Image: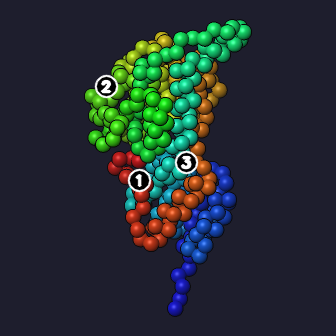
Amino acid sequence: MSVAPPLSLTVCLPQGAEEWAASLNLRLAGQVEASAWRAGDPPADLAVLWKPPPAFFNEQTRLRVAFAAGAGVDGLLALRPPPGLPLIRLEDAGMGVQMAEYVLHALLRWYRQFDRYAAQAQRAEWRPQPPLPKVEWTVGLLGCGVLAHPTVRALQGLGFPVQAWARRPREGGDLPVFTGDEGLNALLASSRVVVAVLPLTPDTQGLLQAERLARMPAGSYFINIARGGLVDETALLDALDRGHLAGAALDVCATEPSGPEHPFWRHPRVQLTPHIAGATLRDEALDQIAEKIRCWLRGEPISGRVSLEAGY
Ligand code: GLV
């Protein structure tokens, strides 16, 4: 009886592809043979990839399935992978908890007035401020997929009112979920802090433009842990300059990396971080991708399949 040779798997990542390939070979010994992608390599059967160069899909013409090493696949889809190629995205794999930490850090800094205390400390001024009423700090999440769940649980655990908006109607359990254009306007108008945790798709590109930002209450806050393209940056800066928005914690920009001249760096109401809110954690991601590959090899359905129509 002849034994089928292992399938070939190419790993194309901005860094660490050799280590990922070695780890996949350990996890999937005898089933796949993984190696780091190099330009001109022969076509492989499977791919694990993130930010591949544009030549990748032109050269890799025999792929049967591709696994993204991240959650948001807008960048990959922009490279126009072959329409029939099943593309599977990473689901959570430790990103959701990191994103919850990021949101809590920003929210608690504002709600517990830590900037004010830092300014007082500069003056060696011991002056307790009256606590702010938590009921006035409703957090509205744009998006309530798997990546948002740890944030919802953490906020609810601390007693913050939480609500969410989803493009399509969905059951949110004890979480009020708004939907559609009207629902978006209602959520924006009734949230003290708006958190973007949505995929970037043709439908969500520029979702938060001037008119929508104007619906947020005066003195509200914005956190973006998803994609810069969700918001019109000029309109956001204008809302911050006017003080209509009291602050923004931004982990993403429309163009990344954002250059030193980007006004977000120096804006007194903005805290900008370099796209680190939900990093891909190597071991968690490798475990999840290896499990998805095992499912695929057994011919079973795999969760996280990207819909080209929906764009995520
Ligand atoms: C990070 O931004 C990701 O999409 O995984």
Vertical relation: 33 (above or below) 141 = below
Residue 194 appearing in the image: no
Vertical relation: 63 (above or below) 259 = below
Q: Amino acid at mark 2?
A: Ala
Coloration of the structure image: rainbow
Q: Earlier in the sequence, mark 3 or mark 1?
A: 3
Q: Amino acid at mark 1?
A: Val
10 Å crowding of disc 1: few (<14), some (14-19), many (20+): some
Q: Dot 3: what SS?
A: loop
- In terms of image quadrants, where is residue 27? bottom right
Q: Earlier in the sequence, mark 2 or mark 1?
A: 2
Q: Which residue is mark 2?
A: 186
Q: Position of residue 266 (x, y in %)?
A: 62, 20
For the residues labelled 3 and 1, the Cα–Cα distance comes to 19 Å
For the residues labelled 2 and 1, the Cα–Cα distance comes to 29 Å
Q: Which residue is mark 1?
A: 306
Q: Dot 1: what SS?
A: loop
Q: Dot 2: what SS?
A: helix
